[in-house]
Image (cartoon, rainbow, N blue to C red):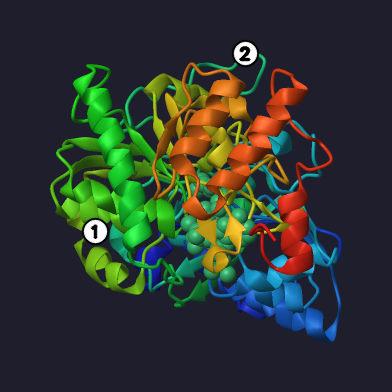
């Protein structure tokens, strides 16, 4: 079995234990690990590293594609291994350490990390740790369920540790398309012209002598904890479907729509799930994470092709999809996140981008990351890459959170991830605001009328009317703009006293 997975024979001699491989990671190093939204992360070496750090403390800068599975971010945070973490996470334990100021978290657009590495704008990766399904005859590394930043980490690092995961199906080979942009300033256009475009190699090309250690693991990816659609997410999906149907009626697109991008989380997944019962057909995805809904749409005959950077599924969906990977494979590509999220490609393909907001304000600014303006949730992820460059930038959220104590529509967002300039459509279960072509004063009226929960609508309208009397292009009462967040902090609810 191992000989089929490590096909460059001289590398068979480099198989070591996870402890031996982890010993190559020294205090103060920058480590680039595979892993993107809990898929395809190196699993054995980080655990061994955390174990070692408990006996012999050390600190590293950890870069990944995005979040890690198998509680690795939590384990590394608890072992105090992480000095700095780049560019995304979604773990409650690490979140706690970040919000306590113990871990310096650099919350970055997911397309940008390797561009900055390549141009030495941030400290270089000393060592890469990459999960693979196989090493080819030439020494090429075949990733598993995600590509993320693994290719550039392996290419740019001095040394590479490969984790061959025997539990990942060998049929993953052939799924990946590794294309690395040429150096600037004379960069050639990225030749992705449709979601199906294959423009690179099915493996990460590295000189085999750079592979200093190989660890064999058998741990599975963590499954996604996606909640099933509920009445509110079904209503959000319904509102969005009606809107897109009208776009078709207006002749702006056909029933195949434009290629779709959908963000992480329960709500975006439920929205895509809602397309199963829509009249749309021959859909395509050019996204970042392929969640359960991607495969549900395949099975419903609605989706023709999906390009992403990772496959992250619920336990039930893993059981269904992995044994049938060969059937899906002709309709799938996994790319480096720099390509799945590249502004040039997103703009060229004209994506409909659906991402989730924690809160948005009456003018359409969106906060996707900071609870109460201060406390990190997960990070901006790829939402900024897509929102700024898409054909249409849509943000969805439930109109209230925490049993109604929080209104997701507020006078002024407490942190801005997506400015009003990057936001076209806002959708809650209450309704949809089409902001295209509207000035701030018009936007406010449409948002308040269409998206706000009835419990908060009058208060928000009252704020806007009083603000308007003060004048301005984007009227506000600055001393009151955050009063809803202050009330939440002081009284536990944004509801008017
Ligand atoms: N203030 C405080 N908390 C809020 C809130 C608000 N305005 N709105 C929602 N929440 C809470 C929810 O109550 C829930 O809390 P819980 O985990 O304690 O139950 C949590 O935030 C998640 O909300 P949920 O409604 O379950 O949405 P989700 O699973 O779809 O996640 C985001 C929403 C915004 C956290 C998530 O989509 C995200 O991290 N986005 C940023 C990254 C991104 O968009 N990437 C896209 C490219 S992949």
**Does residue 71 lie above or below 293 as drawn?**
below
Tell me where residue 283 sits by quadrant.
top left
* Residue 264 vertical position relative to residue 346 in the rendered view, above or below: below
- Report the image quarter containing ligand 1: bottom right
Q: Nearer the viewer, mark 1 or mark 2?
A: 1
Q: Secondary structure at mark 2?
A: loop
Q: Nearer the viewer, residue 482 or 264?
A: 482
The number of numbered badges drawn on the structure is: 2
- Residue 391 visible somewhere in the drawing: yes
At 28% from the left and 32% from the top, the residue drawn is: 244
Quarter residue 304 falls in: top left
Question: Which residue occupies 46% across, 72% down?
Answer: 222
Is residue 24 among the parts visible in the rendering? no
Q: Is residue 124 left or right of residue 19?
A: right
- On the rendered structure, is 488 left or right of 294? right
Q: In the visual, does 173 lie left or right of 139? A: left
Q: Nearer the viewer, residue 394 or 430?
A: 430
- Looking at the picture, how far across and down is residue 79, in whole percent? 77, 78
Precedes in sequence: disc 1 or disc 2: 2
| Location of mark 2 (residue) | 186
Q: Are marks 1 and 2 in contact (CB under 8 Å)?
A: no
Whether residue 446 sits left or right of residue 154 in the image: it is left
Task: Report x, y in % for residue 276.
Answer: 19, 50
Q: Which residue is mark 1?
A: 325
Secondary structure beneath label 1: helix
- The spot of residue 4 in percent (x, y) is 35, 65
């Amino acid at each position: 079995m191992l000989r089929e997975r490590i096909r460059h024979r001289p590398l068979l001699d480099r198989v070591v234990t996870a402890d031996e491989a982890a010993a190559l990671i020294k205090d103060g190093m920058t480590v680039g690990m595979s892993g993107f939204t809990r898929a395809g992360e190196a699993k054995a070496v980080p655990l061994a590293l955390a174990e070692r750090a408990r006996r012999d403390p050390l600190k590293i800068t950890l870069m990944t594609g995005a979040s890690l599975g198998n509680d690795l971010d939590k384990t590394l945070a608890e072992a105090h291994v992480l000095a700095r973490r780049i560019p995304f996470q979604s773990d409650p334990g690490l979140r706690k350490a970040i919000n306590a100021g113990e871990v310096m978290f650099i919350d970055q657009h997911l397309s940008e990390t390797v561009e900055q590495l390549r141009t030495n704008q941030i400290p270089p990766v000393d060592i890469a740790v990459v999960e693979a399904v196989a090493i080819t005859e030439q020494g090429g590394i075949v990733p598993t369920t995600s590509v993320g930043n693994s290719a550039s980490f392996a290419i740019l690092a001095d040394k590479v540790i490969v984790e061959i995961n025997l539990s990942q199906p060998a049929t993953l080979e052939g799924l990946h398309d590794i294309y690395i942009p040429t150096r600037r300033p004379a960069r050639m256009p990225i030749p992705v012209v449709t979601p199906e475009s294959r423009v690179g190699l099915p493996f990460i090309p590295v000189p085999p002598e750079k592979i200093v250690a190989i660890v064999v693991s058998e741990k599975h990816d963590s499954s996604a904890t996606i909640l099933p659609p509920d009445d509110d997410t079904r209503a959000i999906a319904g509102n969005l479907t009606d809107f897109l149907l009208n776009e078709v009626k207006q002749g702006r697109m056909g029933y195949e729509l434009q290629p779709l991008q959908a963000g992480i989380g329960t709500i975006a997944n439920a929205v895509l799930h809602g397309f199963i019962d829509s009249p749309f057909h021959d859909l395509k995805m050019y996204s970042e994470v392929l969640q359960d809904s991607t495969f549900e749409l395949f099975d419903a005959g609605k989706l023709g092709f999906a390009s992403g950077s990772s496959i992250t599924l619920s336990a039930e969906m893993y059981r269904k999809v992995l044994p049938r990977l060969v059937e899906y494979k002709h309709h799938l590509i996994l790319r480096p996140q720099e390509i799945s999220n590249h502004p040039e490609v997103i703009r060229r393909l004209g994506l409909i981008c659906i991402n989730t907001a924690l809160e948005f304000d009456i003018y359409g600014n969106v906060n996707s990351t900071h609870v109460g303006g201060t406390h990190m949730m997960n990070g901006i992820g790829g939402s900024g890459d897509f929102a700024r460059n898409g054909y249409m930038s849509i943000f969805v959220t439930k109109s209230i959170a925490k049993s109604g104590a929080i209104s997701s529509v507020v006078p002024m967002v407490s942190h801005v991830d997506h400015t009003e300039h990057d936001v076209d459509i806002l959708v809650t279960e209450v309704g949809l605001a089409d902001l295209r072509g509207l000035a701030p004063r018009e936007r406010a009226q449409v948002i308040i009328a269409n998206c706000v929960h009835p419990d908060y609508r009058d208060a928000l309208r009252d704020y806007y009317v009083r603000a308007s009397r003060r004048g301005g292009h984007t009227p506000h009462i600055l001393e009151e703009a955050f009063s809803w967040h202050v009330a939440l902090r002081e009284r536990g609810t944004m509801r008017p006293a």
